[in-house]
Amino acid sequence: MSVLLPGSMVNGHPATLGVMGGGQLGRMFVHAAQAMGYYTAVLDPDPASPAGRVSHHHIQTDYLDEQGLAQLMQRCAAITTEFENVPAPALLTLGAHRFVAPGADAVAIAQDRAAEKAHFVKCGVPVAPHAVIETEAQLAAVADDLLPGILKTARLGYDGKGQVRVKTRAELVSAWSELKRVPCVLEKMLPLQDECSVIVARSGSGVLVHFPVQRNLHRDGILAVTEVVDGLVPAALAGQAVAAAKAIAEGLHYVGVLCVEFFVLQGGQLVVNEIAPRPHNSGHYTIDACDQSQFDLQVRTLAGLPLTQPRQHSPAIMLNLLGDLWGANGESPAWDRVLALPGTHLHLYGKLSARKGRKMGHLNITGATPEAVRATALQACALLGIEPF
Ligand code: ADP
Ligand code: MG
């Protein structure tokens, strides 16, 4: 692929990077691209989308709209995506005429839990025992050993949605009906000790770099806290996680930023859970705690610029800020009090209405020592009404 130099002119127009989807991940991509001197274009039907509002260009059409896609291609030399459910045909159309990263094939695998699991197996990384359920016969043939388990829709699940926990065969049968008998994956319920994730970036020339392994705490199926502190994830385990993430990216011939989520089982064994073909909520701390953020690396991979190994310069904790923290009439939390704490970095996504469970922003906390970061994070939790961790 060719290099799109920052701040350059292409056919008389400023070099422009495009993104499919206008959510907060697109917004932070736009911020990083603009900081480096690129123009940006966002395709998202929502006129109030967080990324659309800050981009040079905002194309407000459906993801499959031919004119919208044509406009995006006319504006942009290279295009990325910020959510994994961008319709694959849209990426194929774009990919036929423009550099698209990650490619449609990799995104299609990440869109489908069954294909994703098959890819993990192919890469030789450990996965949860599971079975694909698309037919009555497959439902009947499920091994007893997979129960109790979690039945997950193969497609379109996120933040714990599209999942039912089942203890018995009878529950499994009714859960599949509840999920409208769409293709599903049944996973054995595993005894989790921890969850962690790794973000890697791979360039078009095959250079692979990675961020440190993050420890993640989920609440009600939604990421609540990410901690990235030396020694929190044992070194041997972190090494395995990075190696697995790199094998998965290599196996996909991936170009772009990829997040791999893991379970750490009681007993210390590592299991790959799922991948996201984009920057990830668990990597938001990189904006303030690393010399390059996950969004900077997304820009570099898309523009064909060199990748160098990023370095974390400060221990960090990220608190996700959900709509639950806002008042009943939309009153803002006491940011002035939170920002009086040392090393706090507030990121709000510009969403105008706060709903329960809606990701409104995140708070990164950095400091000189892990103890200082943790103490500040707990103070921020107390001020905001977030349950301590
Ligand atoms: P989502 O796409 O909604 O993030 P995940 O598959 O990551 O779906 O599941 C959400 C959460 O549910 C996980 O972060 C984990 O806490 C729990 N979970 C998922 N699968 C299992 C499993 N096989 N065993 C135990 N807990 C699980
Ligand atoms: Mg998940």
Image (tube, rainbow, N blue to C red):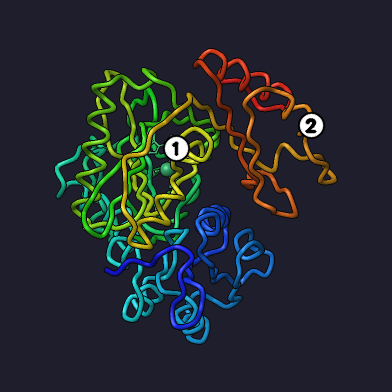
Residue 18: image x %, image y %? 48, 68
Mark 1: which secondary structure? loop
Query: Where does residue 106 sit, x and y in percent of width and height?
Result: 29, 60
Measured along the vertical axis of the image, is residue 324 above or below residue 337?
Answer: below
Task: Tell me which label, 1 or 2, sits earlier in the chain.
Answer: 1
Which three-letter amino acid code belongs to the residue tagged 1?
Answer: Asp
User: In the displayed structure, does residue 355 sit left or right of residue 73?
Assistant: right
Q: Is residue 283 visible?
A: yes
The residue indicated by pointer 2 is: 336
Q: Residue at x 57, y 63 (%)?
A: 22
What residue is rendered at 44% in x and 83% in y? 11
Q: Is residue 221 above or below residue 301?
A: above
Residue at the spot 59% in from the left edge and 72% down from the top edge:
57
> Could you say which disc has been placed on residue 291 in the image?
1
Residue placed at 57% from the left, 15% from the top?
372
User: Along the horizontal axis of the image, is 273 left or right of 226?
Assistant: left
Q: Position of residue 75 (x, y in %)?
A: 49, 78
Q: Is residue 139 visible?
A: no
Q: Is residue 205 left or right of residue 347?
A: left
Badge count = 2
